[in-house]
């Protein structure tokens, strides 16, 4: 099981987590929207017993065991286009996304 970060995403995450000790990023999903799931990206203040941890490009990623099958193989990218900036989720498990792009199904 793997989750990867692009160089741009790793750089942005390092900036976001610069004040957090230890620096860890939680990736997950929650039930939401018309298609079923939405991504969760937030600092991981604590690690739970059922969490799985990965290291990629100097970033510690924390994922709950329940979310791992949905996120397995995903690449997290970060793009800045003009005034817009956002993380982009390249997830091979996504079967369908809603029209607004806020939720997906697997």
Image (cartoon, grey):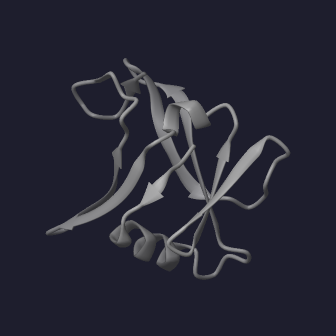
Residue 17, image x, y percentages: 58, 74
Q: Residue at x 67, y 76 (%)?
A: 20
Q: Residue at x 26, y 63 (%)?
A: 79
Q: Residue furthest right?
A: 49
Q: Residue furthest left?
A: 82
Q: Is residue 23 left or right of residue 39?
A: right
Q: Is residue 2 above or below residue 82?
A: above
| Quadrant of the frame with the N terminus | top right
> Closer to the camera, 36 or 95?
95
Residue 93, image x, y percentages: 40, 30
Residue 9, image x, y percentages: 39, 66
Q: Residue at x 68, y 59 (%)?
A: 44
Residue 65 falls in image quadrant? top right
Residue 84 falls in image quadrant? bottom left
Q: Is residue 79 left or right of residue 42?
A: left
> Closer to the camera, 39 or 69?
69
> Closer to the camera, 42 or 47?
47
Q: Is residue 106 left or right of residue 83?
A: right
């Amino acid at each position: 099981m793997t989750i990867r970060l692009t160089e741009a995403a790793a750089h942005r995450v390092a900036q976001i987590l610069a004040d957090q000790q230890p620096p860890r990023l939680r990736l997950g999903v929650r039930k939401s929207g018309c298609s079923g799931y939405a991504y969760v990206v937030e600092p991981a203040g604590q690690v739970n017993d059922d969490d799985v941890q990965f290291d990629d490009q100097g970033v510690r990623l924390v994922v709950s065991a329940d979310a791992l099958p949905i996120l397995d193989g995903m690449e997290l990218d970060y793009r800045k286009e003009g005034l817009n900036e956002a993380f982009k989720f390249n997830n091979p498990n996504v079967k369908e996304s809603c029209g607004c792009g806020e939720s997906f199904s697997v």
